Each structure stands twice: as structure tokens, then as C-alpha cells.
Amino acid sequence: MGDTTAVPVLVLSVSRDPVETLNSLLRNSGLAAHCTWIPAVQDVPDALEQLNPELVVVFAPSAEQLAGIATVRDQMAAGVPLIVIREQVDSKVTGEDMSRGARDTVSIASPAHVQAVIHRELRAYRMERTLTNTLRSAQDYRRQLETVLHRSNDAIAQVQEGIVVQVNDSWLELFGYADASALVGQPVMDLFDGATQAPLKGALAACLQGHWSDHLLKAGAVLADGSGVALELVLAGGEFDGEACVQLIVPAHKRDERALATELAEAMHRDPGSGLWLRQRLLRLCTERLAKPPSGGVRCLALLGIDGFREVAQQLGVTATEDFLAQFAAQVKTMLGPNDIAGHFGAASLLLLLERGNARDAEAWSESLVERVGRHRFAVGESHVQVSCSAGLAVLSSSDEGLDASAAVALAALHKCADRGGNQVIVNERVDQDTRVLAYDQVWVKHIKAALAENRFHLVQQPIASLTGSAQKIFDVAVRMLDTQAREVLPSEFLPAAERNDLMRNIDRWVLRASLEIIAKRQPDQMFVRLSRDSVLDGTLPAWVGEQLKLTGAEAQRLCVQVTEAVAERHLPQTQALLSELRRRGIKVAIEHFGAGRDPQGLLGAVPVDFLKIDGSLMQGLTGNPGLQQRVRAIVDGAGKRAIATVAERIEDANTMAVVWQLGVQYIQGFLVHAPEEVVLKS
């Protein structure tokens, strides 16, 4: 057995000589045994109790003696093997001994057989003992777990292969069920609304594979009475009946007096039916937010209105209309981003201050909301109502005149929606006069040229996270300009002027040079750097990049140059030439904002790339939109056939992350992973 621990063996024989013979035989076979001699049958009970033997050997017992020893063994040490040794052995004798309780009968005249049988029985006994202890531990763990589950204030359900296998009392109480039998054995998806099911499926699968951390999943629960409630779920791996499972946990919120006082104060400024801000507090919050510069991306004011609301209100009546408006607000709330502000602007309109990666993201989010409302059936009383809504958007810039002017622009856009029949989104950007743009550019061109001359730029990084468990260090970089007081200026403020005045080529080269220096010093696995249209059309860029690689000593494969889908479509020959030349030099290439153009799959076949970054506009409303999910899956499948890695842009919540994980996306970036301005890379 290869075990050096002395095995306690109880030997029953008339004289001591057989004990020495057996001890020598076992040691010669490599088994360290400690044999204790028992000369009389009546001493067996005490020996079993005191010595805890792993083996009992009896030399030439009578039939009565063997039966008596086996009975005592069964009472005090069940499972310990009992071996009989005789001078002569045949099948008849062995059978009779085994019928009286022995495991086997051997002859001392065949020492090899004796050794083999004893080794076999000891191994079987130890395996059985280990299994018994394991099962006992598992049973103890199961009892402890059940105690924790049922005493916990958190609502907990355990799910295996999509089926509820166990729930605690808090879960039953939360969902309105009297008995666990109503839930155990049922599909967990039946407990959640359609918009929640896609992200929940992805999160369950990710959790089982160990790819889900402590993200909160927003969920719409369907209670026993058919009503709904918004929850936040925590997912954790677990075990049930020896098999892996996922625990769905709704944490019990512990409120202290200070938190309760804050919530009560806020509740006074929220509509009791919808939970959204009332108009006065809404306008104040928007004003306060607009007084501070955005951390990144753009802000957009969205005004939502219900199409034909007057007719709907007349049809429903006053009381039912209030119920309908609360349900409409609930549809909006489920889609809000973490930094969005939303509240009541008029009797049937909502005002939202959205923060998104760009204006197209805000527009796509609004389109997804309009589509979602249009296909939703609002249960009002005993009837169902279907309506459409529209959204007027005003994109805010650093030159905005404030909330009043922006709200007026959004309202004008909403009126256009009504004039065109509703059920649509219109973006009404404030149009600047040519003279105003010219004056604006003159100021910025001066600042940009001075910043380039004085090296007043720096880079910020945004981590790109793997959804497959990889520990790669991958970053996307963006440029920031510093004014003369060293205050950071966002790209949205100075890049438009740079694009209109042929300054992007110089800025791109500054970013490339700084990125290569960082790559040489810190050696990230991958660093993404975007190029403008001007650089794509610059035929001298590949040779310049080659020179910079030599000067900095950076490894080419760590750099990934990315071009937008729009630029690639509009300038396909130049894009093909540039990316092919960069790949020839060992540099990775990518298409960003992919999937929103005219022919994504055609472009994919025309431009060989290493990465596709799926446009953030496709992430807006993805969790509850099967059509969008199909579009993203088609992109992932097309990329997979060409061995191209996929990155989902602008992931801002765990629900969207869960869906893209299920769709097969390999990497994500966005505020859920990290805000780009929080980690500064200095060259």
C-alpha cells in the first residue's frame, strides 16, 4: 500500500507464534503493521474498543468462535475486515467462513496470497471509511447550509441547470409564495420578466464558469400575484447535492437612521407612483450636473412624450391613467444608465439627462426605448393598452447656453416627432452660424497649436477586460489637452476644431509616439490607438511608424491601430493599404464602432483585421431587445469564422455585460470596467 503509518491489527490465536509470523509477513510486503495478540475470545470487545483496529485476523477458529467474533465486530466496529487463517483452505471452507462473517480465508502456506488479501481488504476498508466520512461531512455541510439559508434575511434561491432546487423563507416571502413546493423544480426564468431573462441567462452561465464577480444584476421579478418588482441580484457559485449550482441572492438592506432620514428626504421629491424625480428637484439636479464638466463622452437632454396621450387618457379615465403613467415610467427606469437623471417634466412627459459615449449612443438608446414601449402591453385594470412614444433630443456641448436653451431644443424636436406621426426619435442639434463656427475655430486652433508646441497633451487609458478569464493587460488610450493652467480639456471640446482645420494628423502622431514610449517602458499585452481620417489618408504614416518603433524600442505586436467603421467604408482603398502595411510590420489592427454602418459583413470580408470593436450604440437597450442581440451575435459569428477577436464598446452595467458574454463577445470596455480618466499614463 505504500503507507508508512503503522496499521493496528488485532490477532486472535492460541499462541504468540502466529502473531510474529504474520507481523514479519506484512512487513516483508511493505506494510508497517502493529499486531496486538489476543489469546481469548472474551478479550475481543475490550480490544476493539481500546485499539480501534483496521484489521482483525483469527487463526484457526471453530465455527462458534468465528460467529461470536463476527457478532462482536459488527456491534462495536462494523466494517472492519475479518480475515481467517488456516493451514488448509478450499472453496468449501472459505464459503463457510464467509457465511459466518469473515471477508476471506487464507492459508499461511501461501504467503503471497495472504499478503494480497490483507492489502486488498485494508484498501477497501480505508476507501469505505473515507467515503463515509465524506458523505457525513457533506450531510453536515448540507444541514449547516440549510440552516444558514433559512435563517438568512437575504432572499436566496439555488439554481441548477436553469431549475430552482432550493429557496429560503425570505425568498418565498419576497416573491409571495406560501410553500417552497410551488417553486422548487420550476424554471427560474418563470420568476422574471422577458427583459431580464437574457442577462440572467448570461450571468448564470458566466457564474458557473467562474467568470462572474460581485456585479449587481438588475432584474424585473414576477411575483406570485402577477405583479412586478425591480430587484438587484447578487450571483454566487454554490453546491447542491454534490453538484455545482448558482445562488441568486437579493440582499436584505440594513438601514441606519442617517440613511433612512436621507431616503425619506429624497422620497419627498419623488413621484410616489413612478419613483422618478418631481419637476422642481429634477430641474435643480440637471442644473447642478450641467455646471460641472462631463467626465467623458457627451451629455444629451431627452424629452419623452406619449403619442396621442389625450385620447389615451380619455379612454382610460383619471385613475387608470395614473396607473398607466407609473407603468410607462417603470419601462424607462429599467433602461436608465448609472449616471442618468430622470423625472417628470409635464403631465405626460419625462425629461432625462443622459450621459453616453457619443451622440449616436444617446440616439440609439432612445430608439431602443421607443421600440420597447411600442411592443409592450400595459396591463391597466382588466384591460391591456398599447401605445407609442417619441423622444426629442438635444446634444449638449461646452457652448450650450444652459438648461433652458437645451430643453427648448429638445421640446422643438419632440414637436417635430408629433408632426411626423410619432413613434420616432429626432435629434435637434443647435445649428451654429458659419461666422460663429469660424470664430470658435480661430480660438481653438491657436490653443491646439500652442499645446502641440509646448507638449501640453497627455494620454489616459481605459482598461479592456477579458470575458474569458484571461489576465491580459489591454488598454485603449485617448488624448487630453491641458490648458495653460494645466486643467484638462476633453476631446469633445477641441477635436471638432482640429478636424475642421487639418490638425488631426499632428495630434495622431503625438498620440502614437507617446503610446509607443509607454509600450516600450511598461510592455502591456495590447494598447489600442485610434487614427483619424486624416491619418488614414496619409501615405507617409507607415514609414513614420516604422521609424518610431526603432527609436522607442517598442515591440510592434503590442500596438493595435484602430480605424472607425465609417472612415473605413468611406475610404476603403486607403484603409486597406494602410492596415495591410501596418500588419506587415507586425502591428495589430482593428475596426472600431463596428456594426452600425451600411454593410458590416462586407467590410469585414474586405479589410483583414485582428480585432472588431462592436459599436456602443448596439449596446443601448441590448438586454431587452432580441433584434439587437441577433445583430451582435451575427457580428460575433462572422468574426469568429475569421479568427478575429471581438470587443464590446461602452458597457456600463452588469446586465449588458451578461448578455454580450452569452453572445460570445471576448472583451468589453466601458465605465463598468473602468472610467478612462481615472488612470493617467504619463509618457
Image (cartoon, rainbow, N blue to C red):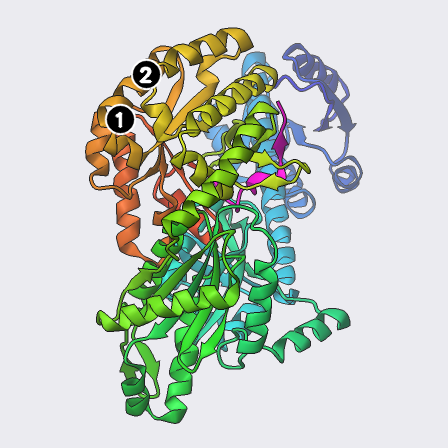
Count the marks: how many? Answer: 2
Q: Earlier in the sequence, mark 1 or mark 2?
A: 2
Q: Quadrant of residue 315?
A: bottom left
Q: Quadrant of residue 533?
A: top left
Q: Which residue is mark 2?
A: 539
**202 part of magenta stretch:** no
Q: CA distance from mark 1 to mark 2?
A: 27 Å
The boundaries of the magenta stretch are 669-683
SS assignment for the magenta stretch, majority: loop
Residue 33 versus residue 286 in the image, above or below: above
Q: Is residue 493 left or right of residue 309?
A: right
Q: Position of residue 35 (x, y in %)?
A: 75, 23
Residue shown at 42% from the left, 25% from the top: 505
Q: Which residue is mark 1?
A: 642
Residue shown at 68% from the left, 32% from the top: 54
* Picture quarter with the C terminus: top right
Q: Is residue 666 visible?
A: no
Q: Secondary structure at mark 2?
A: loop
Q: Amino acid at mark 2?
A: Gly
Q: Amino acid at mark 1?
A: Arg
Q: Is residue 632 left or right of residue 348?
A: left
Q: Nearer the viewer, residue 216 or 347?
A: 347
Q: Nearer the viewer, residue 307 or 11?
A: 307
Q: Position of residue 679 (x, y in %)?
A: 62, 35
